Amino acid sequence: MAKNNSSILHIDSVSVSYGRIEALRNINLKIEKGEFVTLIGANGSGKSTLLKAILGLHHPSQGTILFMGSDITRLSTEKIVASGIALVPEGRGVLPLMTVEENLELGAYHYKGNVDEKLEAVFARFPILRERRGQQAGTLSGGEQQMLAIARAMMAVPRLLMMDEPSLGLAPLIVMELFNTIGQLKAEGYTILLSEQNALKALVYADRGYVFEVGSVMLEGTAQELTDNAQVRAAYLGGAA
């Protein structure tokens, strides 16, 4: 895959196997600076596996992953995170016995700037977290935990913000608030890679998307092209126009 100086991420012919099971097959994907790209597909289609491969939690059996022009395919997760990639994991992944503030401070582990200033910026965006700053994260509601997970990732000031199924298990009103927040982050210049089963919401906010089926990319295009595609509408958008 040809390099582009504006590209944040290039994934070239990546496959990932779990033993004899090939979870991803020959994935090609790119993200430009400031883009919001979404991965849509059913549970088990390979979306989460790709995010984990990017973060170094699974190493590809073939192919390369370039981040900011550098090969990160075989780097450790710690080095990949330090290079500027943050993941909001499926299921939130907050540390339940630690306070909200302690969770946020952990997110800034690799941040070289003023952590207190960044903390204030995050509290300004998520006022409920300021109110809960001394509260154990495990006592928050599901929606509050998701806000904390996003805020924790933002504490690292990432060049690429990845989110894995952030709307999973949340009430419709909270999902709407969540996507409004993601849309605001995109408007502020964050580069976002979102894995999401709620394809209808994801495509409203995204610039482009990739449709995953059984470990392969079956379709790709602009958000509008995918929304207008009859196969995508039938499979993921409930027949919506």
Image: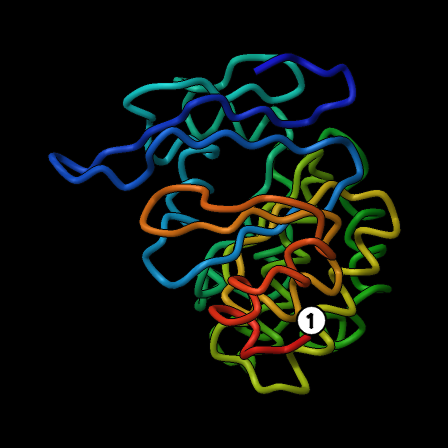
The x, y position of residue 97, in whole percent, is 44, 67
The x, y position of residue 20, in whole percent, is 11, 35
Above or below: residue 177 compared with residue 14: below
Residues 188 and 31: in front is 31
Q: Indicate the colouring scheme.
A: rainbow
At x 72%, y 16%, the residue is 4
At x 68%, y 69%, the residue is 133
Is residue 195 left or right of 118 when viewed as pictured? left
Q: Of the residues shown, which amino acid type is indicated by label 1? A: Leu
Kindly identify which residue carries mark 1: 178
Position of the N terminus, as image quadrant, is: top right
Is residue 215 left or right of 151 when viewed as pictured? left
Identify the residue at the far front of this view.
230
Q: Residues within 10 Å of mark 1 (few under 14, many from 20)?
A: some
The x, y position of residue 72, in whole percent, is 49, 18
Q: Quadrant of residue 148?
A: bottom right
Q: Total marks drawn?
A: 1
Is residue 14 left or right of 9 when viewed as pictured? left
Position of the C terminus, as image quadrant, is: bottom right
The x, y position of residue 16, in whole percent, is 30, 32
Above or below: residue 128 compared with residue 85: below
Residues 115 and 176: in front is 176
At x 61%, y 65%, the residue is 100
Above or below: residue 169 compared with residue 49: below
Residues 54 and 147: in front is 54
| Label 1: element kind | helix
Is residue 43 left or right of 181 when viewed as pictured? left
At x 54%, y 79%, the residue is 238
